[in-house]
Amino acid sequence: MENRDQNKNEELIDELVQTDAFNEYWSYKFAKWLRMGKDPNDENGIATYRLWLSNQIEKGVGYNEIARTLILATGDTHNVGPANFYRTVDGPRKQAEFVSELFMGSRLRCANCHNHPLDKWTQDDYHGLASIFSKIENAQIVRVRASGDVIHPLTREPAVARIPGEYYLKDKTQDGREDLAEWLTAEDNPYFAKAIVNRLWSSLMGRGLVEPVDDMRDTNPATHPKLLNRLAEDFAASGYRLRPMLKRIATSATYARSSNTVPGNAEDDRYYSHALRRPLEAEVLADGISYVLNVPAQHGGKAPGQRAVTLVDLYTPSRTLDILGRCGREESCESETSISGGLTRNLHLLNGELINARISREEGRLARFFDADTAPMDIIDELYLVALSRKPAGATRRFWREQLANVESVEQQKGLLEDFLWSLLASSKFNSK
C-alpha cells in the first residue's frame, strides 16, 4: 500500500495471474460453466475431469484448444477427463443446447419445436446440431456408435447433421464433431470468441456486455458492441489465452471505477458508470470467512481446511455452502446474477453459527492476537488488512478507539473486538465484490 509507483496495479495483476489462487478460482469458474457435478456412481470420472481442467488453466492452454478437446473427446471417463463432457447432460438434443449456450452464447433450444421467434435459428439448425451428437454413447466409456439419429419433428425423418446457420453435413458415416470443432474454433467464427469474452467480462464486472451471457442475438444486442468485437478480436489474436484477456479487463478504467454513485447514475446497471456490487459466490465467501477467522471449515467428509473452490463435487454435503447459496449443477450458473442465498444468507451472516460459532475459537486469528498481547487498535488495523486489503478510514478508527476507551475490563475488550470482527465479516464490503 505504501508503493507509489503508478504501475503498481498492473504489476500486482501480473503477479496474481501466476498464483495458485488464480488457477484454483478460474478452474472453479469454468467447472461451474461446464456444469461439473458428480454422477452418484462416477466420482472417479468427475475427479479426472476437474484435474484435467485445472491442468489446462494452469498451463495456459488456449480456450480454442480446450473447446476442441472437449468436443472431440472419447474414451474411459475415469481416465480421460474431457470425455466427461458428454456425461453432463442426457441425449443429443440436450447436448446441442449445452454446446450452443456454452461455446456460442446462443439459445438454440428455442428452435426445438419451431423456428426461433427472436433469432435466426431454425429447427434445421437445432436438430441438425443435435444430429451431430446422435451417435455418441455417453456411458462410462464414451464412444461413437456406428449409427444414431435425431428425428426432425417437422419431417418425421432423421435430421440431417448441420453446422448451425451454415451448412449441412451430407456424409452420414463421418463424425460431424470434427467439422463442428473446426468451424467453432476458427478465427473468423462469429460466436466463439465473443461468447467466452462476454463471460469473462461478466465475471469481473458483474454484468455481461450481453446479458444473459448465453442469449446473444440481434434482438438482444451488446450494450457496447464495438468493445465486444474488439475484445473478441484481441482474444483470438492472443491465441485464445485467458490470462492476457483477464489482465486487459482488470487493468481497464472501467474495472477500476468505484461503486459509489453520483446523482444521475445510481440506477444504471447497464453502462458501467460505476462498479456493480454483487454477492461473492458461496464457495469464495466460505473460503474468505475461514481465512479471516483462521478457523478452517469442513465440507462433507473432506479434510478440514480444503478450500471450497477446490471441491470437485458441487454436491459435496456442506451446510455452510447451502446457507451461502451455492449454485447447484442443475442450475445454469451462467451469470453473476445466478448467485443466490438471499435472506437466508444474510440472516446467517448476522445471527447464525457460521461466524459466531468460530469467532472466539482458541485456534482462531483473534485469539492469537490476544495471546500475543497485541494492542487493540493494532488488531483492528490488522483485521482490516486481512479482510479488506486496506486499513480502516480515519472515522472508523476514531469510532472503535472511542468504543475501546469505554470498556473497563480485558474480557469486555475481547468481547468488543469480537463484535468488531463480526461486523467486518457481516458487512457488504466483505461479502460482496
Image (tube, rainbow, N blue to C red):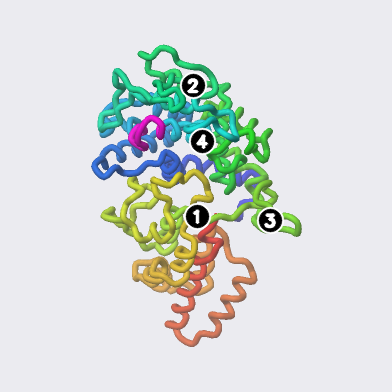
Name of the residue lying farthest toward the left: 41
Residue 431 x %, y %: 51, 60
Q: Residue at x 50, y 66 (%)?
A: 426
Amino acid type of the residue tagged 4 in the rendering? Cys
- Mark 1 or 3 closer to N-term? 3
x 41%, y 70%: residue? 352
Secondary structure beneath label 2? strand
For the residues labelled 1 and 3, say whether their Cβ atoms are less than 8 Å apart.
no
Q: Observer-nearest residue: 172 or 430?
A: 172
**Label number found at residue 280:** 1
Q: Quarter of the image holding residue 402?
A: bottom right
Q: Which residue is mark 3?
A: 267
Q: Quadrant of the C terminus?
A: bottom right
Question: Mark 4 highlights which residue?
Answer: 110
The amino acid type found where label 3 is placed reads Glu
Residue 313 percent location from the top left of the image: 33, 46
Rendered image: mark on residue 163: 2
Q: Which residues are magenta?
A: 85-95
Callout 3 crowding tier (Cα within 10 Å): few <14, some 14–19, many ≥20: few
Whether residue 90 is in magenta: the answer is yes
Distance between the Cα atoms at labels 2 and 3?
Answer: 41 Å
> Sequence order check: which comes first, mark 2 or mark 1?
2
SS at mark 1 in the image: loop
* Residue type, numbered disc 2: Ile
* Mark toward the start of the polypeptide (4 vs 1): 4
At a point 52% along the width and 26% down the height, the residue shown is 239
Tell me the chief SS of the magenta region: helix
